[in-house]
Every structure is written in structure tokens, then in C-alpha cells.
Amino acid sequence: MVAIDRAPAKPRRRYRNLWRQTPQSFRIGLIILLLHLILAVTGPFWAPYGFSQMGTGIPLSGMTWKHPFGVDQLGRDVFSRVVHGAHIVILLSLSGTALGLVVGAILGLLSGYIGGWFDNALQRLLEALISIPFLVLALIAIASAGPQLSGNPILVVAVVALVYAPRIARMARAAAIDIATRDYVTMARLRGESAWSVMRRELLPNATSVLLVEFALRAGYAPVLIGSLGFLGFGLRPPTPEWGLMISENRALIIITPITVLGPGLALASLVVGLNLFTEGLARILGRTVRLGNQ
Amino acid sequence: MTPDTVLEVRSLSVAYRQGAGWSRAVDDVSFALKKGEVFGLVGESGCGKSTVSLQLLGYRHPSLRAEGGAVLFKDQNLLKLARPELDKLRGEKIAFVPQNPTTALNPGIRIGRQVAETMVAHGRAKDLGGADAVVGKYLKLVGLPVDPAFLRRYPHQLSGGQQQRVCIAMALCCDPDLLVLDEPTTGLDVTTQEQIVSLLIALRARIGLAMLYVTHDLALLSQIADRIGVMYAGKMVEVAETEVIFNAPKHPYTRGLIGSIPRIDFDSAERERPLRGLLRRQELPPGCPFSPRCDFALERCFTEPQKAEPTGPESSVACWRWREIVPLPPEPIVIPPLPEAKGELPLLTVDKLDIHYGSAGKVFRAVNDVSFAIRQGEVFALVGESGSGKSTIARAISGLVPPAAGTVTLEGKALAPRVNRRSAAQRRLIQYIFQNPDASLNPRARVGETIARPLHYFFRLDRSKAAERVAAALADVQLDGSYAARFPDQLSGGERQRVAIARALAAEPALLLCDEILSALDVSVQANILKLLQALKAEHAIAMLFISHDLAVVRMLADHVCVLYGGEVMEIGPVDRIFAAPFHPYTHTLLQAVPVPLQPPPASDGLNAGEPQRGGQGCVFAGRCPWQIGDICETTRPPWRAGEGGLRLRCHHTIEALNELADWPPLTETSRATRTRHENRVD
């Protein structure tokens, strides 16, 4: 084949080319995510009021320039609370999903590779967990953890992981069954490698694109799950400025000042939309090239 | 365009989309096909031969564009033709036979209906139901049974050879003027290939249609083609009559290609020097694309593009030095002496091995009563068609498939049936090399990590020691140490197979199980790996179980050969006894089917295909055997017979009778020059 010569691009231009080649959804999602991250990191320094500061204005006075998201019934500025709470949702959803990914990936890959009764037993268990609606499952877990743990952020992380791990494990298992038929896995088996070693060296590196997409997808719904827990009162405790909790606190007065519910709701929605667009773009990129860059 | 020209390709250039740009896959290719002529297109993978063949059908795709030239069929340029008109031509006037019939046939449609579809599309039949009678005519033409039950079969109920026959029938059913065949026999067994080629030759004599035959197998082309075009890196480097290509090749690449063919007739004295190096598409010089690998290249070759120069009325060569170059003396072939048998004990013995697949209700006997022994440092070859159980035996030796009965003994100790019950030392001593190097290397691990893994695992070496040994292992397979940092997708197929061999060698095995390790590679790469294996055999004295369907390669490399059919041993013995009379009937059939350059294929109706008679009372080869005695073959298991030099074979014929029946090797003095062409000619 005759290759048409192309001058090697300068690094600057190469990055610009790379950016242009990414799908539009990826770019939009990335911008939304970056805005959220900036808000989470810098928010506490420039928020006009503290997150539990009362008497910032007339309660339930609605949307004004001073209080873009209004003032709640205790006289707290909702906008400041949204800004202060930005890092909580991001932190909890990412760490919860990450924990779920680690547990789910290990279980799924091992189960797909080993097969047999181990695979059968584990899959039935995971199917049972998946068949329970996720909010119900979360509530069972929180209830069984006992009252002394309720409102603990670690419990929220664990619940997110518990909900996601079985779903991620199923994806990982499917990938492992496919990869396990390749000859390099047979080579490892002939060498006598343990299942753990095969998983770590042969299966995991070849399942990363599947797992990465799965992670981003689950992380996109985690804020909704955490928000729902907060809304139902099983998440974090007041006065934590968690968005779901704020929606729940203000929902009784939604007819008088809808903006106090709409504000945190919009923040939550934009984070979920951003994460989803990002995931969709990422999946398309990974579908196109297995290994990013490095070519 | 002369009146008897069917199709003419004029300076065709085709490019594929690659990232943001386009890269040329075919560059300025011209040739013409006359009525009733078979034109062969040959070259290594990636040379653009399939791209050219698809352009003959006016193939279009968003990531492919014709950048210049024309494909003229009856004064119409297929590259410019509107889609509806093209559709009328394709299938009716120009037909295509694909490489892989299994994926070309729709698995959900009965074969009779699939053939009829083409006829209905071109108005040869009114509806699918009414076409049956006509379909039968074409199935008969390609040697398939015509009974209605056969028409109602689905593709998966046919063998590979029958599927390819259906594809050919589909191509022929509108009486085309031109047949384009893209590697039609590459996926098939050698005996099936012989039947398909005989069929094509017979068809051509009867119908007289022009064919473009695309293949990588030059020996095969010599049996069927009138003229051959040799392609390299998208350019046509030489076009000439078949006998000229073989007897007086002009382009250095053609010479190398002919020199690289493993010859089963073993006239190694007059061998050309095989090709060296690899086609590197990214580093082609502006001049002749072959110059980096050419033994005759001068300064001018690297800078000046080569134009096709006519060498005769219908032949040309793209090399400005073609008049002056003379054949180089062939490289002496070192046949390493068989290492002295160390000790009396064989390295590996396989004793009365039975392997079954499936559960108790429906058992498939893949391997039945197979016994052999491999001595230290010898190459033991298992040959047979697909389904003969050769890979299954290797998998049983490696411990992947537990045998139903029988034992495998390594160095005097019986091996556990499953690999996870064997000791680390036993696992280390037997190393497997797979057929397809794309699948046997972890795509996410660097070559260095892949080779270092057995070192870490078996020898507990630290990083620096392992790195040294990796470099040594790479040097063993003639790769540079810098390869350690690369990923498999940055290597060519041949380089990947070398890495797989290096990984196996790193474990310091006593026995290598080589499962068809050459069959996924190009002929010039095959020649290089073959040389490498010969060198390894001489240096390391590692025993190899060499599984192959390629008898020529087996003859070059093996010390002992075991011929399998239907999971049973037909013949076993030293290599020079296997390739000389007496032959087992099956060995004889196999040898006859191998295409030898410029030898006519054996006269056959191409119809004696059959399935092995597994688990029956008689011989597994009964029913397909050309020398069958009679009922005794069907009812009684044949006895073992001993020949000279340790040869043993299983047949009802006596050794003396088999000696008389043998008709191989073909006599070379009648083979010269034009015999094939005259035999194949339409008149």
C-alpha cells in the first residue's frame, strides 16, 4: 500500500485535532462536568452566605437578584446552599460507583473465567439482588445497618456500591466469557496461572474499555440515587446541603416558592445530563479505538 | 480494445480512507482478459489483489474511492456506471465467487432458494418456486446431487466443499461472461481444494468463460491460469504467461515468490533464493516499492518509479534491470543432523489415546486408539484434513482436553489428564504455540511482558535478569531487542508468530506443540519462519509435535510423520518412508491433491468426497478409498502392516500390493512447460 505522506503535526495542533475528532456529546458533556467540578472546588470560597447561615433574607421571598434560588423557610439562601453542596454529590457518587466497580469487576471477571458451579451460584445471587428495585434494596440495606450509622456518608457510599456492583458484575462477566476464549488466556491456563492472576493480567486489561463505559454510565445515575435517598430522608442528615435533601425540605412549600425546589433540582439534573453526554461520547470513542492514544 | 477482449483494466488506482487521509491500495494497475482466458492474480496479503478483483464488479464503498483509470467491460466503464445499470451487469454478466462460502451463504435460506434468488433478480426465472428445475441444472453442472431433498437443505447441512460448489452454482446460474474468484479454495482442505480446482477446469472447458482467479498460492495458479499477474504493494510488477512466470521469471519479486514456495517434489537443488524481509507499507521508498527487499536494487531503484515495460505481446515487467539480472545461486539448505538419541527412553509417548466429545447420549469419537512416541530433539508431524483429530491430540497432550482412555507419558512419568493437576515442571516442559498469532498474544501487554511472564512464573527471575532473557529469546527468533517495548498490533503477522515462538522458548521446554503455526502466514513469511524452525531444531534440540495440513512443509521439517484420518492413525514412520512407496491409500490421496507448480492436477471427477466411517466395524477410510478391495474394508478393521525402515500402515492391501498401486511422485520429465495449458485449453 502506498501511504500518502503527511507532515507530522505540531503537538498543539495535534491536541486541537484530537479535540475536533471527539463526538459532540463528549465535548458538551465534558464542559458541563468541568463547570460542576469548578463549582465544587471553588464554591465554598465565593458563595455569598454560609450553608447553614440563617436570616439571610425574608423567608420564602422568592427569586431576587440577591437570592437567585430564593430563601427557604429558615431564612437560608438556597443558592449558597446549592454551591456549598456541589462537592458532596460528586464525591459521594464517584466514590460509591468506584467501590461498586471494583467489587463488581472482580466478581464478574472471576465468575466468567472460572465458570461452573461458582459462576452459577454467584449469578443467581446477583440476579436476586438486581431483581429488587434499587430504592427498596437501598432502604433494606440502610435499615439493616441500624440507626447509629444512619446519615453517615460512608453508608451512602456503601449503598451506592451495593446497588451497582451486581449490575457491573454482569457486564464484566459477559466480557470475561468472551475474552476467556482467546488463545492468550489458554496460554496462561496451560502455564498454570491462578484464576486471580489470569484475571489481573489477561482479563482486566482487555476489559477496561467495557468497564470504563460502565463506570461512567453508573456514575451518571448515582446523583439521582443519592438524591432520592436524601429526599426520602435516608441519606445524609440536615443541615447538610445535599441537593436531594434540600428538595425534600422545601417540597412542602413548592406552591409558594417553586424556585427553592427547582434550583437544587436543576443543579442535579445538569450534573446527570452532563455525565450522560460524557459517557455516551466516551463509549463512542472507545468503540472506535481500543487503546486511547499511544499509537 | 481488441474484439476478443472481455474486460480491460486501464491504469486503475484505488485508495482507502485511513484516518483523515487516503492511502493508495492499488496504484496504476493495467491488464486485459480475453474470452475464455483464466487470468491469475497473485501476491502476498495486503498487495491489493482483492481490491482489484472487487473493482471488476464496480464495487463501491464510502471508505474506498477509485482515484483514476477505468474498468472497461463491453465499452462501459464500470467505475462510472450508474447504480441501476451496474446492478443489471453484476451477477448476470460478471459473477463473483467469494473466499469463505460459510459466511457468503445466508444460513437461514435453503440452498435451492438462494440460487434461485439470483435468477429471479436477473429475470431468468419468474418466481422462486418455478426456478427449481433450472437450479437443478446448475447444481448438476457443479457436481452436486439434484434431488429435491438436497435443494431443501440449509447451508450448515453441507460440507465446506459443497458450500463452495453452491456459491459457484450461484455465480454460474445466469451464464456470465466473466467469473471473478477471490481465493475460492483458501479455507478448504487440500483434497477439497483439488476437487474444486478440477471442477473449475472442467467448467471452463465446457462453458469457455473468462475467469479472474485471485490467490496467494502460485502452485495452484500454475494448474489453472493461462496468464498470471504478480502484484506487490499495490502495483502490478509482472504480467506473463504461466509457463514463462515459472520457467523464466523476470521481476526479482516473482523470483523470490517462486523460491519461497515449499516444494513437495523436493527439487531443492534448482530452488530460487526465497524472499527476505517484510513488506513495510509505512516505509516505502518513492521508487520501486520492492527495492528494500530486492537483491538487485541499485541507487536508482529507490528513487525512480518503475513503469511497466512490455516484454512480449501480452506480458510486461516493472523493473528497469530485467534484462541484466540473473538468478542468484540458491542458498545452501542446511539439513540439521538428527541429534543422537539421548538415552533409550522416548521423551513423550502417547498410548492408545481415545478422545470423545459430547455427553453420554451422543458421543463423537474425535480420536480413536492413537499411539506414538516422540524422541528428544525430533520433529514429529501430525498430518491430516480438518476434523482428523490432530489438534485434539495436541490439546490432550497439553492437558486442555482430558482423554476418554489412554495415557500420555512424559520422560517416563504418566501425565495427569488435566493441566491443573500437573506439576509446574511438567507444565514448563510442554509449550503450546497456536495457529493464529493475533489471538495468542494479549493485545494489551507489551511483547516484553508477554515473553517475561513465563520467566517470572517458572524461574522466579527478577526484573533485570528477565529483561536479559527476553532479549535473548527475541534474538533466538531473529527479532531486535527494541521489539520488547511494542504492542502486538504494531507487529506484522510473521513478527507476532515469532514472538509467540519466543514466549514458548523462554520457558526452556523439551517439547513444543506447534498447532498449524504457519497456516495463517504469507508464503514468504512462512519460508522465513520455516528457516527459523530449522535453525531452532538444530541449535536447541527441542522436540516438536508439528501439526500441519501442508505436506510440503512437513517434508522439509519433520523427522517422523503420522498420517491421521477420522481420528485414527493411517500410516506412521520416518519422513522419507512416508513420502515414498508404499503409500497408504489415504496418504496417496493427500499427496496427489497437493498442487505442484506446472504439474497438471490428477484427472478426477472431483466427486469422491465422503465422511470418515467413525466407530464402525471396518476401516475409517472405507467409502472414500480409491483402492478399496471390497466388502472386507467395510466390515473388518484393517491390520497393521510393517514396511521397511520402521514404517507402519493400516490397510487390507499387502505392502507389495501398495507398492504396485503407488503413482507418486509425478514424473518430472513430462512436466516441463506447456503441458498444463494445452490440457486445460478450451479447444
Image (tube, rainbow, N blue to C red):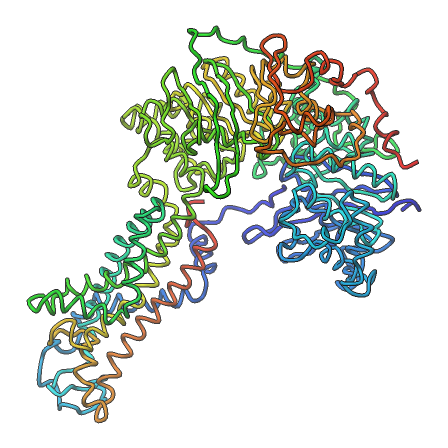
Left or right: B655 in relation to B525: right
Where B37 falls versus B509 (above or below)?
Answer: below
**Depth check: B92 or B280 in front?**
B92
Looking at the image, the residue that sits furthest to the bottom is A256
x, y percent for residue A100: 26, 58
- Judged left or right of residue A257, residue A4 is right
Residue A164 lies left or right of residue B290; in this view the side is left
For this rendering, which residue is in front, B590 or A104?
A: B590
Q: Can you say which quadrant of the picture contains the C terminus of chain B?
A: top right
Numbered marks: total: 0
Rendered residue at 72%/40% (across/down): B214
Identify the residue shown where x is 44% and y is 43%. Answer: A181
Residue B283, given in percent of the width and then of the height, sits at 57, 36
Q: Is residue B624 left or right of residue B465?
A: right
Q: Is residue B458 above or below residue B347?
A: below
Q: Position of residue A83 (x, y in %)?
A: 20, 74
Which residue is at the front of the view, B634 or A151? B634
In percent of width and height, residue A125 lies at 28, 58
Q: Is residue B305 visible?
A: no
From the viewer's side, name the closer residue of B164 and B243.
B164
Decide: is B274 above or below B155.
Answer: above
**Is residue B676 in view from this perspective?**
yes
